[in-house]
């Protein structure tokens, strides 16, 4: 306890400031409320049933999320685990969405159970996927992220396929703390109390858990059972918050990290101070949201603040790790020439399929003759965009995986595609009716800036995979919440952004296809000049300079091309496709090992994947079309999860 | 636009989001044989192409699709909803213009005149009622509503029926409902008309909400729920709203 007291004395100023800030903001809101010319009875009611519960629910939810995060981090021995990075929050939202569409009655009677089902489902899935890797932190969080993204994509696809356009916004948003009674606060507080007692009881066994597994076992603690119990408590806490107030990310990550940064050393100190800090963080954040007078959900803002916070904490959070070796590939090695022939044929077949076979009012039909000419005008631009974007994303993926020596790097995972969205958003919001070329420029600049920012963070840790990924997650969530906030403004540009976010290629014109094709033709061939760099760079700067390579200059060129490729592709297919992650791996598995081979193979595979995805997205829910990017991520997410399961990314 | 065509007795060959139409717009019903073009935000151009239209009716909301649509057939884009401007007159103008383009100008005049007559009839029928100001809202979630001002079709029809709109600010055209429930307490003597559809979650929570129950209109029994009406419709939606609104007033004063 001495340590806890010392902690509170030393960073007492920080805590006091937070309390004063939170209370001040709440008072400000109260004064504003009482000053309005509504009937006094209503004002009183608003104060007691809306404003005060809002402050209370912020504190209670923040504390719950923080405790949940701290428990996860302890048991999984993972400093970046928390309800949103483990996919729990998204699991809950997907389950609630499914229930809303398919079982509204269930939604009315047993929201809790639906949410619990979703939360535990997502969490167990993440655990099952990473059990073979011994719950390696990076794998766990990456699986959680992928489960999150896939759940989000499924939810949106579900709603789009049901013909409802607006509700997708509704599902993606959430995290509003506005209250109309004390009931959610009391529910969350009750859970927090029970969980608090449970974790206090488990504190001693938890201390033993912190020892390594063998000594814990020799002390006679049922390690597995104990761990599981704590995890159940943590999931239950997170689900409770998610069901009551929606998706609020990063509090569970920020609070324990802040506790450590403020000097909490022992797990007891972290577990005790995290809920306090979590409550304060959410209280102050929500107070700021209220004071700004905007109606942006607080959950979107925590992600907005969470991103930079995470970036700031990165150096404290992670130790530099040795480079991650590429996973050995067991597949029999095919001759690259033969493999290229097969993949090339697949691409031609996919393109032919996309061009010729389609559904119409009278069912399936093969477009031939004059019909073909007519359809080609519509289908060809989409196919060209899909193929060239797929190829460019795949190439960017190869470059990034080689530059960072990290098999999990890709434009999507590192948030570079989201960064290009920020660039696009800046152009859309500042220029009226910008041309495609200008949008493209915005996307490329956005991608470049993001990539440089992430690399700048990573380079200090010698490209440690954890840092790189965390930086990527932070940038992604930051970009994602900026875009959510923009979409919430409801301007026409916002709907354009939403369309972009889901990766719709429906509105492309032949001119767009030409732009995309020109970009691909300009950017792809020069890459093959970089073959030597690509084989030397992953070996590290020391080897590089020994072999006479100026690593800095080489990296800069590759980074530039990766940004150009990502921007040019993401402007059309959005940030969600995962082709940039999948294609390089598929290429390696198909036998394309050497850098130039892998590049060529990945380009072909990436193009094929997106062409097939585009066709499926058009056909599956005809005449309702799914956005290409969203649909591709439905294929890509599970594939990646499977890849992780096979052990890529395990140390 | 779809409902305008149906009202003119000239059903289109294809239209977007028929499933949503059946749920929210409800009337007039869509005859069989109208092809579904998919989502407004992701129109199925191939389906549209195969429907071989002679004319495509669009709105400024679908401006993004205009270049594509023009490749299929001539496009007529008519604005009904412009923030800050009352839409009823624009809906009349749009009806006339569509009818003129279809060579059935007479039908257009008839639809406009019938609508005006219907509104007048309802206005007369409601003449003896107490004239409380009215809030017209969509429920977004249990704590938020979208409130319709003078520049909405509902608000516009309301004033044509001789009622004051209790919501004096403009309508927000956002996708999410942006107004806190407490705003509905600002005019204590008002009546609240909730236009459907109400999300299932809100349907469950709203009646138990202390704040909702404490709103002067709710406490005084002056809150009514209407079936779904398209908030961004043309004349048929305006009439549907007028009829449902009148019926709800009758019901509440009888009961």
Image: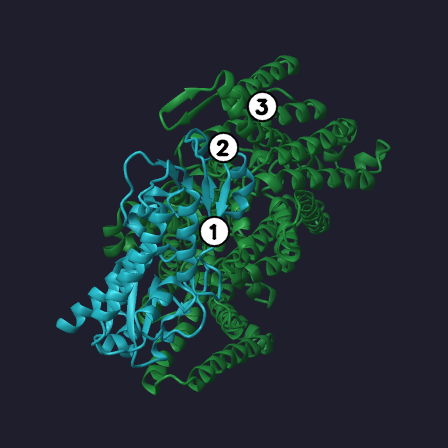
Q: What is the x, y in percent for residue A331?
A: 56, 20
Q: Could you classify mark 3 by the number of other residues whose Cα lies within 10 Å: few (under 14), some (14-19), or many (20 or more)?
A: some
In the figure, what tint was chain A given?
Answer: green
Comparing B225 with A442, the one in front is: B225
Give me the chain that's cyan: B
Q: What is the x, y in percent for residue A620?
A: 40, 31
Which secondary structure lies at badge 2? Answer: helix
Q: Which residue is mark 2?
A: A639
Question: Label 3 vs label 1: CA separation?
Answer: 55 Å
Name the side, left or right, on which A494 lies relative to A242.
Answer: right
Q: What is the x, y in percent for residue A16?
A: 55, 79
Residue drawn where x is 60% and y is 64% of the image: A261
Q: Earlier in the sequence, mark 3 or mark 2?
A: 3
Q: What is the x, y in percent for residue B21?
A: 33, 47
Question: Label 3 vs label 2: CA separation?
Answer: 13 Å
Locate the C terminus of chain A and report the quarter of the image it occupies.
top right
Residue A245 in sight here: no
Name the side, left or right, on which A444 lies relative to B73.
Answer: right
Q: Could you classify mark 1 by the number of other residues whose Cα lies within 10 Å: few (under 14), some (14-19), or many (20 or more)?
A: some
Which secondary structure lies at badge 1? Answer: loop
Q: Could you classify mark 2 by the number of other residues whose Cα lies within 10 Å: few (under 14), some (14-19), or many (20 or more)?
A: some
Q: Which residue is mark 3?
A: A589
Q: Are marks 3 and 2 in contact (CB under 8 Å)?
A: no
- Work out whether disc 3 and disc 2 sit on a shared chain: yes
Marked residue chain, label 2: A
- Work out whether disc 3 and disc 1 sit on a shared chain: no
Farthest residue toward the left? B255
Marked residue chain, label 1: B
Vertical comparison of A248 with A319: above or below: below
Viewer-side label of 3, 1: 1
Question: Label 2 vs label 1: CA separation?
Answer: 46 Å
Which secondary structure lies at badge 3? Answer: helix
């Amino acid at each position: 306890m001495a340590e806890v007291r010392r902690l509170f004395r030393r960073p007492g100023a920080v805590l006091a400031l937070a309390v004063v800030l939170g209370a001040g903001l709440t008072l400000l809101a109260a004064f504003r409320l009482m000053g309005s010319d509504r009937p006094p009875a209503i004002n009183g009611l608003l104060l007691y049933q809306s404003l005060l519960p809002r402050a209370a629910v912020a504190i209670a939810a923040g504390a719950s999320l923080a405790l949940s995060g701290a428990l996860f981090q302890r048991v999984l021995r993972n400093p970046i685990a928390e309800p949103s990075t483990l996919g729990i929050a998204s699991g809950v939202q997907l389950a609630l969405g499914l229930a809303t569409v398919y079982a509204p009655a269930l939604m009315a009677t047993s929201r809790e159970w639906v949410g619990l089902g979703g939360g535990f489902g997502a969490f167990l899935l993440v655990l099952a996927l990473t059990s073979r890797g011994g719950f390696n932190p990076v794998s766990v969080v990456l699986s959680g992220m992928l489960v999150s993204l896939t759940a989000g994509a499924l939810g949106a696809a579900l709603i789009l396929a049901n013909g409802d356009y607006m509700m997708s916004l509704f599902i993606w948003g959430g995290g509003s703390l506005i209250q109309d009674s004390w009931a959610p606060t009391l529910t969350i507080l009750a859970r927090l109390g029970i969980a608090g007692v449970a974790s206090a009881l488990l504190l001693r066994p938890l201390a033993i858990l912190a020892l390594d597994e063998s000594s814990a076992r020799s002390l006679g603690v049922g390690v597995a059972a104990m761990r599981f119990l704590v995890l159940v408590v943590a999931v239950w806490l997170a689900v409770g918050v998610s069901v009551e107030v929606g998706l609020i990310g990063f509090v569970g990550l920020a609070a324990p990290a802040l506790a450590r940064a403020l000097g909490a050393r022992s797990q007891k100190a972290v577990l005790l101070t995290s809920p306090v800090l979590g409550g304060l963080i959410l209280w102050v954040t929500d107070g700021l949201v209220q004071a700004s007078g905007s109606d942006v959900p607080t959950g979107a803002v925590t992600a907005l603040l969470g991103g930079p916070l995470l970036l700031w904490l990165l150096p404290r959070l992670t130790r530099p790790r040795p480079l991650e070796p590429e996973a050995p590939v067991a597949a029999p090695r095919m001759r690259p020439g033969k493999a290229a022939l097969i993949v090339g044929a697949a691409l031609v077949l996919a393109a032919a399929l996309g061009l010729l076979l389609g559904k119409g009012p009278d069912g399936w039909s093969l477009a031939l003759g004059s019909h073909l000419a007519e359809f080609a005008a519509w289908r060809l631009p989409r196919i060209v965009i899909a193929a060239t974007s797929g190829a460019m994303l795949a190439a960017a993926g190869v470059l990034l995986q080689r530059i960072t020596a990290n098999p999990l790097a890709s434009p999507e995972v590192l948030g570079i595609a989201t960064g290009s969205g920020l660039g696009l958003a800046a152009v859309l919001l500042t220029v009226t009716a910008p041309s495609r070329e200008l949008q493209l420029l915005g996307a490329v600049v956005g991608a470049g800036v993001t990539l440089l920012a992430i690399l700048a963070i990573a380079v200090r840790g010698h490209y440690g995979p954890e840092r790189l990924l965390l930086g990527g997650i932070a940038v992604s969530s930051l970009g994602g919440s900026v875009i959510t906030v923009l979409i919430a403004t409801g301007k026409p540009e916002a709907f354009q952004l939403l369309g972009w976010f889901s990766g719709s290629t429906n509105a492309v014109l032949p001119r767009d296809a030409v732009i995309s094709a020109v970009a691909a033709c300009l950017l792809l061939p020069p890459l093959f000049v970089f073959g030597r760099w690509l084989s030397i760079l992953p070996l590290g700067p020391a080897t590089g300079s020994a072999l006479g390579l100026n690593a800095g200059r080489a990296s800069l060129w590759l980074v530039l091309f990766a940004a150009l490729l990502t921007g040019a592709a993401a402007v059309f297919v959005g940030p969600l496709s995962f082709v940039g992650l999948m294609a390089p791996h598929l290429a390696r598995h198909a036998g394309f090992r050497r850098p130039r081979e892998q590049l060529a193979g990945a380009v072909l595979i990436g193009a094929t994947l997106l062409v097939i995805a585009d066709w499926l997205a058009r056909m599956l829910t005809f005449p309702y079309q799914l956005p290409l990017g969203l649909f591709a991520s439905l294929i890509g997410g599970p594939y990646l999860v499977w890849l992780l399961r096979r052990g890529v990314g395990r140390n | 636009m779809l409902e305008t065509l149906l009202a003119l007795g000239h059903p289109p060959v294809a239209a977007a989001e028929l499933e949503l139409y059946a749920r929210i717009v409800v009337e007039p019903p869509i005859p069989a044989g109208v092809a579904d073009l998919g989502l407004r935000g992701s129109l199925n151009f191939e389906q549209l192409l195969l429907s071989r239209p002679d004319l495509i009716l669009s709105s400024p909301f679908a401006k993004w699709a205009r270049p594509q649509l023009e490749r299929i057939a001539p496009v007529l884009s008519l604005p009904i909803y412009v923030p800050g401007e009352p839409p009823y007159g624009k809906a009349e103008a749009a009806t006339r213009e569509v009818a003129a383009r279809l060579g059935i100008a007479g039908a257009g005049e008839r639809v406009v005149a019938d609508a005006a007559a219907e509104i007048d009839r309802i206005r007369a029928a409601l003449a003896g009622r107490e004239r409380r100001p009215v809030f017209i809202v969509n429920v977004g979630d249990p704590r938020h509503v979208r409130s319709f001002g003078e520049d909405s079709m509902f608000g516009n029809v309301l004033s044509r029926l001789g009622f004051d709109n209790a919501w004096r600010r403009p309508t927000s055209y956002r996708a999410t409902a942006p107004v806190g429930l407490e705003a509905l307490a600002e005019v204590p003597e008002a009546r609240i008309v909730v236009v459907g559809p109400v999300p299932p979650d809100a349907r469950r929570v709203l009646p138990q909400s202390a704040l909702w129950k404490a709103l002067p209109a709710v406490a005084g029994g002056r809150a009514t729920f209407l079936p779904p009406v398209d908030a961004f419709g043309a004349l048929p939606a305006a009439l549907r709203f007028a009829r449902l609104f009148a019926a709800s007033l009758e019901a509440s004063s009888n009961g």
